[in-house]
Amino acid sequence: MSEKTVVSQPRPFIMTTVSNQWTSGICDCFQDIPQCCFAFWCFPCFACKTAHEAGECLCLPLLDAFGVIPPMTTALRVSVRQRYGIEGTVCNDCVYACFCGPCTWCQISREIKTRMDPITFVNMTP
């Protein structure tokens, strides 16, 4: 007579930190000091680099200089919100782009950086 032994291994429980909110606030520029300094000392270069990291044309932010409402900052913020499922409105994006332009670009950059390297927790307990 033969007996079958079934051995079950514990499976990992994987949880990612994906949220429907921005991972940092609009005024949290000092969370990433190198990015903050880059944005302060050479904002046009920083904006172009951030647009490129978001998958847009490198020179796209330069078009913001021709409007009362910065259209490219608003459009990129909306695009990043939609890509990552972040809640918000176009109206809020427009207000942030108009009155907090550099902070908005820093927030977009931090968001892309954070979402590109998500933190994953693995729990091996049964």
Image (cartoon, rainbow, N blue to C red):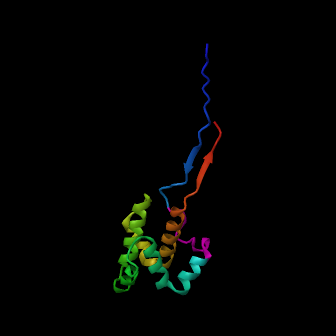
Residue 111 coordinates in the image, percent (x, y): 51, 66
Where 99 sits versus 81, above or below? below
Q: Residue furthest front?
A: 1
- Residue 32, percent from left and from top: 60, 73
Tell me if residue 117 is in the magenta stretch. Answer: no
- Residue 41 quadrant: bottom right
Q: Nearer the viewer, residue 99 or 86?
A: 86
Q: Is residue 43 visible?
A: yes
User: Percent x, y for residue 51?
Assistant: 43, 75
Q: From the image, which quarter does the N terminus lie in?
A: top right
Front one among 95 and 76: 76
> Which secondary structure type mostly characterizes the magenta part of the structure?
loop
Residue at image point 61% right, 47% down: 122
15 with respect to 85 (left or right): right
Q: Which stretch did the figure color magenta?
A: 22-33
Nearer-the-camera pick, 38 or 121: 121
Which residue is depicted at the point 59% across and 39% down?
11
Is residue 88 visible from the viewing direction of this image?
Answer: no
**Quarter the C terminus occupies:** top right
Instruction: Spot the residue most to the right.
Output: 125
Q: Quadrant of residue 61?
A: bottom left
Residue at x 39%, y 73% (from the top left corner): 56
